[in-house]
Image: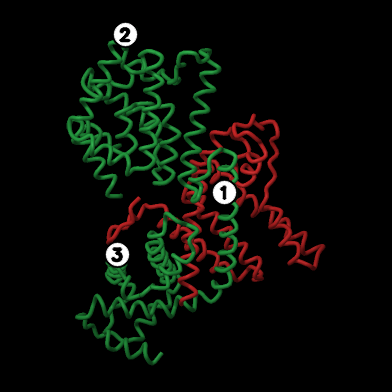
Chain colours: A red, B green
Amino acid sequence: MSPPQQPTSINPNSLKIRLAYRFLHNLNNLNTKRSNLDNTRIRRSHRVKLAAYASMAYVVGSRRAWSRAILWKIRNRAVLARFKRVDHKITTPLRHHHVHAGSAKRRTPNYSNPKREYSDPFGNSGQEVKLRKLVPGSSTMDALGLLDETADYIKCLATQVEVMKNLVDLYSII
Amino acid sequence: MNPGFMQQQEAFFSVNDHHHLQDMFTLGMVDKDSALNIVKPDPEMEECWVGFDAGAYGGQLGYGYLNQNTALKVSNIHGNASSVLVSPKKRKADKGQTLQVVSEKEKKIKGCCDRDSKLTRQNSNGNNNSNGNNHNKEASTKATSKDKPKVSEDQKKDYIHVRARRGQATDSHSLAERVRREKISERMKYLQDLVPGCNKIIGKAGMLDEIINYVQSLQKQVEFLSMKLASVNPELDFNMDNTFTKEMFDSSTSEFPALACSSANSAYFDQLNSLDQVVSYRGLDMGINSAEMGLRSISSPISIPETFMDSSFFNQTATWDADLQNLYKMEFEQGRLIPFQSHQFTGLNDAK
């Protein structure tokens, strides 16, 4: 993909533009909803991260397994967080610690399908298991699907990283 | 979309006759992939890849369905003519030759991945050359083939494209395994292109390690950047406010210097009361602009200094391009922002 020289020839349907648009939309939602959230920094960065992943998944849509997995996780996470908040109110005064631990735990989701552990095409299956842990929603795929999803996921993730980098630069300049 | 795509289409135009493309235009599915698919209709093997590419371009259509559709349609239209029919005939050919054909197809698929090489090949093939080549190959395969080519009904059925070479196993399991391995190596090559610094590594284990590291680093980068954004973002509304006025001033001086409207500043600030719309709009603009800025470094996502360079040269008047100005114009025409006199506003901005 050759980068367009004139700015008038920006493709409005390119992945990057759509990602940026969706991500900023999510950030705006986050800002408008900010009042009823507790505004600790960790929680906020977590929310921004969720917004990033959600924008990626939203842009890609439901065609890909990883985006479906992300959307599903985010949606269910909202339900889970409601329960968790009630738990926190009842039990623990140390919210920081728990939120942090929860996010760390949630980052590595459980893959509960040991039956689908295919015979490795890669030589040693430890790498494949690692890759399955990294790419969301790839626990129930064979190796071909895993590689497909990985490639698409890498593409989107790299683009998202670019968008976020540019945003950070822009805001830090301002 | 991209100039390469257009050129490729034109090349395709020149290669095939016009009815092809017109039919496909009426179908509304002229795409890079489907255009490629006419040359080698190969539904099962390419569906994944087409979807794969469509991930990049975000077409919401069912590509596989379209591919089969185009292939079928084209084969119906052209009963016996040109390069459409090459590959099914080849598929019916002898053992050694089919494997060769498959490797050639894979080359073509790779060419689908990196568009430029494909383009150069198309261009170098020129007008009638590729057709002639295909006909030659067709003739050679026909000479050695034993089966009669049954064209149109075979196009739906075929899903095993590989036959064994001499000396290789011929039962269906090993054939399928061979197909699977080839597909895996295809995807590995594609991943190798995606992951930077993965080109030098030979061997699947090292490549997988590199891929895993890359994904991990990307995820960590997302985390880090979200932390940064979260630390920046609380002051973002206020900042957006300021920069919005500033850039409105910039665009007004650059684009509407002659506009002399007698509107008070208070009207402008009344318009700012609907700040959420304005802020979201402004955010969109910044997103577009920053994305456009980052397009230059799309091939090297890790290179932080490059992007730093890019955005450190971020000059609001310089990169305030025509698109955004059009957007502003739209905004003006919608009347959400009343046009104002630029001199007046400079005074206001300075005072502020």
Q: Are marks 3 and 2 on the same chain?
A: yes
Q: Position of residue A99 (x, y in %)?
A: 72, 62
Q: Position of residue A62 (x, y in %)?
A: 50, 43
Q: Secondary structure at mark 1?
A: helix
Task: Answer with the quarter of the image where residue A121 lies.
Answer: top right
Lateral position of residue B52 relative to residue B154, left or right: right
**Mark sitting on residue B323:** 3
Tell me which residue sits at (30%, 50%) in the image: B2
Foreground tag (1 vs 3):
3
Q: CA distance from mark 2 to mark 1?
A: 51 Å
Disc 2 to disc 1: CB gap under 8 Å = no
Read off the residue under disc 2: B148
- For disc 2, the neighbor class at 10 Å (few under 14, some 14 to 19, many from 20) is few
Q: Position of residue A30 (x, y in %)?
A: 55, 65
Lateral position of residue A37 relative to residue B307, left or right: right
Closer-to-camera residue (B311/B95): B95
Q: Amino acid at mark 3?
A: Asp
Q: Position of residue B59 (x, y in %)?
A: 39, 43
Q: Amino acid at mark 1?
A: Leu
Disc 1 to disc 3: CB gap under 8 Å = no
Q: Are marks 2 and 1 on the same chain?
A: no
Q: Secondary structure at mark 2?
A: loop
